[in-house]
Image (tube, grey):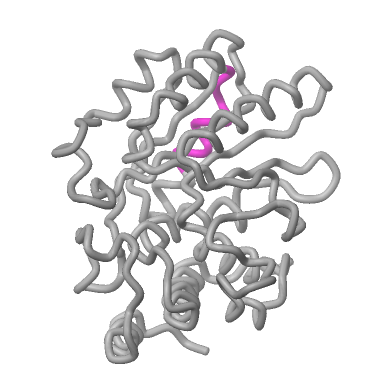
Amino acid sequence: MEIPDLPDLAARIRLDVLEMIHAAGSGHPGGSLSAVEILVHLFFREMRAGAGRDRFILSKGHAAPALYAVMAARGMLPRGELSSLRRLGSRLQGHPDMHRLPGLDSSTGSLGQGFAAAVGLARGLRLSGSSARVYCLLGDGELQEGAVWEAAAGAAHAVLGNIVAIVDCNGVQLDGPVDSIKRQKPASERWHAWGWHAIELDGHSFESLEEAFREARSVSMPVALCARTVKGRGVSFMEGSCAWHGRCPDASELERARAEIGAGP
């Protein structure tokens, strides 16, 4: 398929995310908006489709609106279905449900467990002789879960060169700044200490993402991309605020956000 202009697509995805959450009356805008460029790059530049396709797991499952919007843009589900987010019986639940929506490689929601599943999936693919790679997106607050580091140790011990963890380092979680709750910085040093090849990058720059994923493909050990991002990116009154972790924008706030994002039809 023809690859669209990625910055324009990112703007459209941001607006889709906010409109979905507004229509649903609930959701998680902050961490969805911070992950937009990462998801767009993965689905439109990085991951292989078709036979031997690469796998993706959204371990920070509350950012599902961004994933659904990108999947719709990729043609994996009808764009008109986005308005059904969190509706009773909808395939687009508040957290990804692989039993409802084809194309998902894991159901996620309980933080840390999606990453553990990704490590298991990577190990299984290698044992089967597959060349597919596994990509897993985590939040930096999620790194407070012990299950993350148990899985990271297992991946390093098995020298899984077919897994890439992308950490959305937006610095803010539900109750406040991540480092005021349990310090994570510098994230790259922590991953390196656990036996991973760690790369720091700008998570909102497609050029930085391209360079980081190129480096990730060049090494034969598990890779962690520590992507610096901004919670609520693209909407000034949401940026860097824990208040927008799980708050739904009202009609006037949606209009303000739409004006700032400036996405076309």
Q: Which residues are magenta?
A: 211-220
In this picture, is 198 found above or below 95? above
Query: Is residue 38 shown to the viewer in this render?
Result: yes
Image quadrant holding the N terminus, namely bottom right
Q: Residue at 56% of width from left, 38% of height from top?
A: 114
Q: Residue at 32% of width from left, 27% of height from top?
A: 188
Q: Residue at 57% of width from left, 73% of height from top?
A: 85
x and y percent of residue 171 in the render? Answer: 24, 46
Judging depth in this view, the residue of 72 and 11 nearest the camera is 72
Count of labels in the image = 0
Q: Is residue 114 magenta?
A: no
Farthest residue to the top: give it.
Answer: 157
x and y percent of residue 215 in the render? Answer: 49, 31
Query: Is residue 40 shown to the viewer in this render?
Result: no
Judging depth in this view, the residue of 224 and 90 nearest the camera is 90
Judging depth in this view, the residue of 125 and 20 nearest the camera is 20
Q: Is residue 216 left or right of residue 173?
A: right
Q: Residue at 48% of width from left, 20% of height from top?
A: 152
Q: Is residue 254 left or right of residue 40?
A: left
Quarter where residue 220 is shown: top right
x and y percent of residue 230 in the render? Answer: 27, 56
Predominant secondary structure in magenta?
A: helix
